[in-house]
């Protein structure tokens, strides 16, 4: 790789890292090509990027970005998966892949611009996604309204039931007759 190619790669990676506030660094030694291809596909499905780059180039590209806080973890073969808005989805995909492929070892992470230890990545993966949280919030917001509607409909429903029972009693033969008084 010549100097111009390195400069281009540093610039492209630097632009991507400057936009992203979420990143996960991991070692991938021993993964076979089909496994890496599957990992790339899964990472892309979370609207994230996955790059394997030389550590020296990654450190240059990370200067002035939030990823600079993780510069001490760029040792050995390192891959970086990063995105701009969803650390949970990225952590879920990588954690699931790591369960099936023990050669993928987490080094560190960056979540919302803050460094996170490798041991905490699994905890991040266990969090609900933003969509799940929004759905839960909407359910909780609708619950009191649904209960109120049920309570307000109760008297109307009860009245209808009473009217129906009266109509059924009057429809029975001999129901309208009153017993003779002595």
Image (cartoon, rainbow, N blue to C red):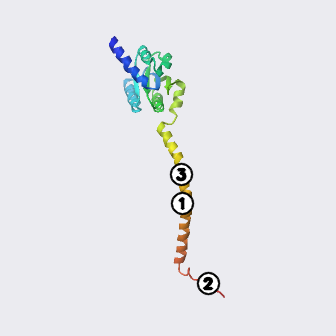
Q: Position of residue 129 (x, y in %)?
A: 48, 36
The residue tagged 1 is 153
Which residue is depicted at the point 54% across and 31% down?
123
Q: Which mark is residue 179?
A: 2
Measure the alpha-carbon separation of dots 2 and 3: 50 Å
Q: Nearer the viewer, residue 171 or 15?
A: 15
Query: Could you tell me how far apart the alpha carbons at marks 1 and 2 are, in whole angstroms?
Result: 38 Å
> Label for residue 145?
3
Residue at the far bottom: name it: 182
Evaluate if marks 2 and 3 touch, with contact meaning CB atoms under 8 Å apart.
Answer: no
Residue 133, compared with residue 116, is above or below; it is below
Would residue 32 be visible to someone looking at this image?
yes
**Dot placed on the residue nearer the N-terminal end, 2 or 3:** 3
Residue 96 spot, x, y in % from top left: 46, 31
Secondary structure beneath dot 3 equals: helix
- Asked which secondary structure carries label 2, the reply is loop
In the rendered image, which quarter contains the N terminus?
A: top left
In-image side of 32 versus 99 (left or right): left
Give residue 92's position: percent from left, percent from top: 47, 32
Closer-to-camera residue (181/126): 181
Quadrant, the C terminus:
bottom right
Q: Residue at x 47, y 39 (%)?
A: 131
């Amino acid at each position: 790789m010549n100097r111009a190619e390195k400069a281009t790669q540093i610039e492209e990676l630097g632009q991507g890292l400057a936009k992203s506030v979420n990143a996960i660094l991991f070692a991938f030694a021993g993964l076979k090509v089909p496994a890496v291809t599957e990992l790339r596909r899964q990472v892309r499905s979370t609207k994230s990027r996955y790059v394997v780059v030389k550590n020296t180039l990654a450190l240059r590209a990370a200067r002035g970005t939030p990823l600079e806080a993780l510069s001490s973890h760029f040792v050995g073969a390192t891959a970086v998966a990063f995105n701009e808005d969803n650390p949970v989805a990225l952590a879920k995909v990588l954690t699931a892949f790591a369960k099936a492929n023990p050669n993928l070892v987490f080094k560190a992470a960056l979540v919302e611009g803050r460094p996170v230890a490798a041991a905490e990545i699994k905890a991040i993966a266990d969090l609900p996604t933003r969509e799940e949280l929004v759905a839960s919030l909407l359910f909780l917001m609708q619950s009191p309204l649904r209960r109120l509607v049920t309570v307000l409909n109760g008297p109307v429903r009860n009245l209808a039931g009473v009217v129906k029972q009266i109509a059924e009693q009057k429809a029975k033969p001999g129901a309208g007759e009153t017993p003779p008084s002595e």
